[in-house]
Image (cartoon, helix red, strand yellow):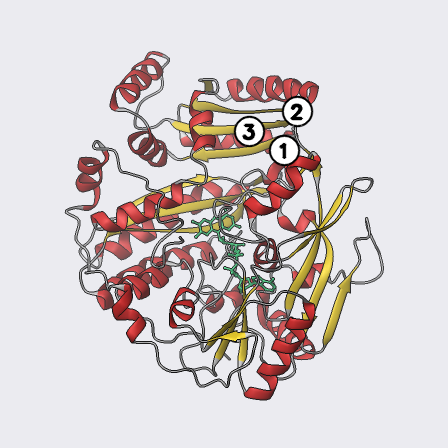
Amino acid sequence: MRRWNGWGDERTMYPLRESARPWLYERVGEPTRPPDTPLSELTQQIPDSPLRPHPLLTFDPQERLRHARGQSFPDWVALRCGRVPIFPAAIAYPENEAHLHTLIQYAQANGAVLIPYGGGTSVVGGINPEPDGPAALTVDLSRLNQLLQLNKTAQLATFGAGISGPDLEAQLNPQGYTLGHFPQSFELSTLGGWIATRSSGQQSLYYGRIEDTFAGGRLITPAGVLEMPPFPASAAGPDWRHLVLGSEGRLGIISQATVRITPLPEAESFLGIFFPTWEQGVAAVKGLAQAQLPLSMLRLSNPLETEANLILGAKTGQVLWLNRGLNWLGQRPQEKCLLLMGVTGDAAAHNYTRRAALHLTRQHGGVSLGQLLGRAWQKGRFLTPYLRNTLWEQGYGVDTLESAFTWDQVIPAEAAIMAAIHQAAAAYGERVLVIAHLSHVYPTGSSLYVTYLFRLLPDPDQLLAFWGAMKAAASQAIITHRGTITHQHGVGTDHAPYLQAEKGELGLNLLTHLFHQADPDGVMNPGKLLPHR
Ligand SMILES: Cc1cc2nc3c(=O)[nH]c(=O)nc-3n(C[C@H](O)[C@H](O)[C@H](O)COP(=O)(O)OP(=O)(O)OC[C@H]3O[C@@H](n4cnc5c(N)ncnc54)[C@H](O)[C@@H]3O)c2cc1C
């Protein structure tokens, strides 16, 4: 059973290593936390639904609670502390497009709004009903979960948009193919959600971001159906796929999507390479990205994240042994940076790419430790989110944010974001652990992914204000360094105030008009993506 106030399956645990406790205590202080609200107590807070019954709707309180919030830090505070300001009025589980049309008509006739719901893993408030808005009908798409068509000749597969990551791969892999889209939320997130938020998987360097693999599909809007045929390429005006990508439910509901698939790779390896400094690591990763070697992943942790990963993931003896060895090779324990490098493809290309990439990393002082650390990462790649449950239970909150910068801004932006978060925490008399890595790289620049860990203040209002101050400070630093407000998580409500800095006044007006054409009555996921104006 899925946890209702945390991440993932209730049976899966991610215990914290003993050595991690004193390490965290030293960095952020003695843990504290607000008390948890029991499920039964929160369920009692759910008011009667104002909507009238319909065979496609359920008003079950548990269902309404489980669809009320996503996975952002404020979502966790809301569920854990029993402060959910509004619940969806009803939930529907459509099984076909006819049901989607019926639900849109129902919403229009009953003054309700619709919230498309994939896996509910949004970390930006994307599936939350608006606190003062009309009754919200959450449309859970999990029953649109089948492989509908497989065209091996063209390497295209069409799926119901509500299919989850594991189900999608389970239906493709026996046919010899993969989509290769592996976000860290893979276990729960869905194809439709990936498209609607412009998601990026961990091996996007080889398989592409979702915008590279989304070839076509169907969008059910209140104004009609938008069909997007999977042309290999087209010059017939603007490409509708690029308006649907990142539309966050505002244009309509993606019912099915055709994706470009890849034969399962013959060979794959994940190597761990240490660099003496962050600057050398960044230079190496830039060199690799610009050499356009067909690697599948480059993930470079800054010194503190390297240390954190070793403390949280490796045994004390192994860390001592590793530090001693790297010290002997001239790398200082506090400055070293770990690069995880994925190589994926057919056997010959894999071997060539691996050799060429290792040669380049050596030129920047890189020392390869082979596949030991890479294998450990691969084994736990979708387990890491479970650590959030453990940390909360021990009194620590953790949140992440991400952006992308051109190469000239990567190093200054990383320093500025870290400093901004520390400064915001200091204003609350708190310390915060801030770590970062580069994870998706391009010839022109890189994404930057920042994780910050802090004590859970016992008063939920104060805790939210504390988190909000850190998030706002980091967002401002991102804009100052000309980064995007989001490289992969989307906009939702949390990033909406920063959208104008990126899109401009005209850009926001164009979006407003576009949404109005597809959805004249404004029933599709209002309040998301565009700031209230
Ligand atoms: C622990 C964790 C790790 C994460 N790691 C990554 C990562 O590595 N890469 C990454 O890109 N993101 C990541 N995310 C963010 C999140 O998983 C992505 O935004 C994901 O694409 C959301 O998919 P979902 O199916 O859960 O969508 P939901 O959260 O259900 O919805 C997200 C938005 O899409 C809309 N939507 C969903 N389905 C449809 C549809 N069929 N039609 C129209 N609109 C729809 C919703 O209305 C909402 O606005 C992570 C989140 C968590 C909690």
Distance from disc 1 to disc 3, alpha carbons, whole Å, reads 16 Å
Indicate which disc residue 266 carries. 2
Indicate the position of residue 2 as horizontal and vertical percent values.
40, 54
Give whichever of discs 1 and 3 has the lower sequence position. Answer: 1
User: Which residue is found at the position 43% from the left and 20% from the top?
Assistant: 372
Q: Nearer the viewer, mark 1 or mark 3?
A: 3
Q: Amino acid at mark 3?
A: Gly
Distance from disc 2 to disc 3, alpha carbons, whole Å, reads 14 Å
Q: Amino acid at mark 1?
A: Gln
Q: Which residue is at the front of the view, 499 or 193? A: 193
Indicate the position of residue 150 as horizontal and vertical percent values.
75, 46
Would you place residue 364 above or below residue 532 in this image?
above
Q: Amino acid at mark 2?
A: Glu
- Which residue is identified by label 3? 342
User: Which residue is found at the position 46% from the left and 50% from the top?
Assistant: 402
Q: Quadrant of residue 331?
A: top left
Q: Nearer the viewer, mark 2 or mark 3?
A: 2
Kindly state the secondary structure of the residue where label 3 is placed: strand
Kindly state the secondary structure of the residue where label 2 is placed: loop
- Which residue is identified by label 1? 290
Q: Nearer the viewer, mark 2 or mark 1?
A: 2
**With 355 as the anchor, is 51 left or right in this view?**
left
Mark 2, other Cα within 10 Å: few <14 / some 14–19 / many ≥20? few
Q: Which residue is at the front of the view, 259 or 514? A: 259
Mark 3, other Cα within 10 Å: few <14 / some 14–19 / many ≥20? many
User: Which residue is found at the position 60% from the left and 82% from the top?
Assistant: 106
